[in-house]
Amino acid sequence: MPLHIIDTAGLRDTEDAVEKIGIERTWAAVEKADVALLLVDAAHGLGAHEAPILQRLPRWRGLTIHNKIDVTGRRRRAW
């Protein structure tokens, strides 16, 4: 099965014109995707910043990935 992974710009509020173009391209890719990975800073987790992102999607079809777990002082979960 072919698998296409696309690394996109982060989704955030910005006034920078070039960054806005990248964010528009990110939304276009997300809306076409079968599955999306939401990368979240492990020190903050899911919060107010991610809520509008999750609300904009017609239905959440993805996985939440927590990065920077090594700087939180928390232990990793063994799978």
Image: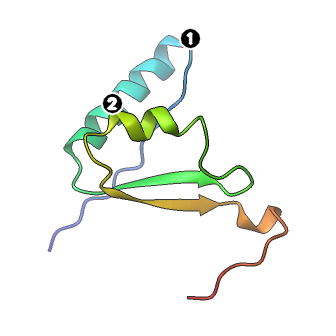
- Does residue 10 appear in this view? no
The number of callouts visible is 2
**What's the mark number on residue 50?**
none
Q: Residue 29: x and y, percent?
A: 28, 40
Q: Is residue 73 above or below residue 25?
A: below
Q: Amino acid at mark 2?
A: Arg
Give the labeled residue for mark 1. 15
Q: CA distance from mark 1 to mark 2?
A: 16 Å
Q: Is residue 72 left or right of residue 47?
A: right
Give the labeled residue for mark 2. 25
Q: Residue 22: x and y, percent?
A: 42, 27
Of residues 39 and 50, the one nearer the viewer is 50
Residue at left offset 30%, top offset 55%: 61
Q: Secondary structure at mark 1?
A: loop
Residue at left offset 28%, top offset 57%: 35
Q: Secondary structure at mark 2?
A: helix
Q: Residues within 10 Å of mark 2 (few under 14, many from 20)?
A: some
Residue at left offset 58%, top offset 35%: 49
Q: Is residue 78 left or right of residue 7?
A: right
Judging from the image, the colouring scheme is rainbow
Please report whichever mark, 1 or 2, sits nearer to the chain's N-terminal start.
1
Q: Residues within 10 Å of mark 1 (few under 14, many from 20)?
A: few
- Does residue 70 appear in this view? yes
Which quadrant of the structure image shows residue 27?
Answer: top left
Q: Amino acid at mark 1?
A: Glu
